[in-house]
Amino acid sequence: GADKGTTAAWMAAHRGMYERATRHPFTVSIRDGTVDLAAFKRWLGQDYMFVREFVAFLASVLLKCCKQSDSSDMEIILGGLASLSDELSWFKKEAAKWSVDLAGISPLTSNTEYCRFLQSFNDPEISYTVAITTFWIIETVYQDSFAFCIQDGHKTPLELLGTCQRWGSPEFKQYCQSLQRIADRCLANATSDAVKSAEEAFLRVLELEIGFWDMSSSQS
Ligand code: HMH
């Protein structure tokens, strides 16, 4: 329809999956204050590894963007890439605070699977539309999950507030909204095949995010 973008329509059509990703028992336990700190530390170490791979993914999105030569998109993506530099420093500081040894971590299965998915975007055959849509939903799952941990009535432990604010802040929400506008504009101009591929990637991200939270909270 003219009143709603494609991405909003997908979020409505796949509401159950979206909520399983953004109201996962792990992040809800942060909000409730019942979070298992061993699980939090597991998430922290695994996510540091994920973010390193995410830098390379974002570089591939930027490259696809540059080939299309849309300079306003480029500035937003480049800004996102630049902020990952600060994010990696934040992970190192946070890991030190929780005595998580980042050098000694190896990726768990769900993380490896997610990283392999990110690496698949190096293929030049994958369109900018599919890549930017994927980027948007990856960021949005974290934005929505962590914003919930700092919304009214939360009991999030004080020492976890910084983590929740990193992705739950109004600034990060605005950034996600600008990515959403780019994705919707690309999708509005894409072929039906590209739209179909983008929707498949959207669903794959939700599945991978659920797997990532499951991995973080499980005791194995
Ligand atoms: C698993 N998904 C995962 N980690 C992240 N840091 C983000 C999304 C958001 O950047």
Image: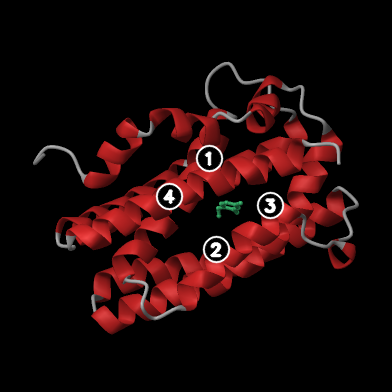
Measured in 3D between alpha carbons, the distance from the residue under mark 1 to the one under mark 3, in whole angstroms, is 23 Å
Q: Secondary structure at mark 3?
A: helix
Residue topped by disc 2: 117
Are there few (<14), some (14-19), or many (20+) residues within 10 Å of tag 2? some
The residue mark sitting in front, 2 or 4, is: 2
Disc nearer the start of the sequence (2/3): 3
Image-based side of 212 in relation to 186, left or right: right
Quarter of the image where one finds residue 47:
bottom right
Viewport quadrant of the C terminus: top right
The residue mark sitting in front, 4 or 3, is: 3
Disc nearer the start of the sequence (2/4): 2
Residue topped by disc 1: 168
Q: Secondary structure at mark 2?
A: helix
Disc nearer the start of the sequence (4/3): 3
Measured in 3D between alpha carbons, the distance from the residue under mark 4 to the one under mark 1, in whole angstroms, is 15 Å
Are there few (<14), some (14-19), or many (20+) residues within 10 Å of tag 4? many
Residue 105 location in percent, x, y?
85, 61
Residue at x 53%, y 29% (from the top left corner): 148
- Identify which residue, 12 or 73, lies in the foreground: 12
Residue topped by disc 4: 137
Q: Secondary structure at mark 4?
A: helix
Disc on res. 110: 3
The residue mark sitting in front, 1 or 3, is: 3
Residue at x 68%, y 32% (from the top left corner): 26
Amino acid under label 2?
Phe
Disc 2 vs disc 4: Cβ atoms closer than 8 Å? no
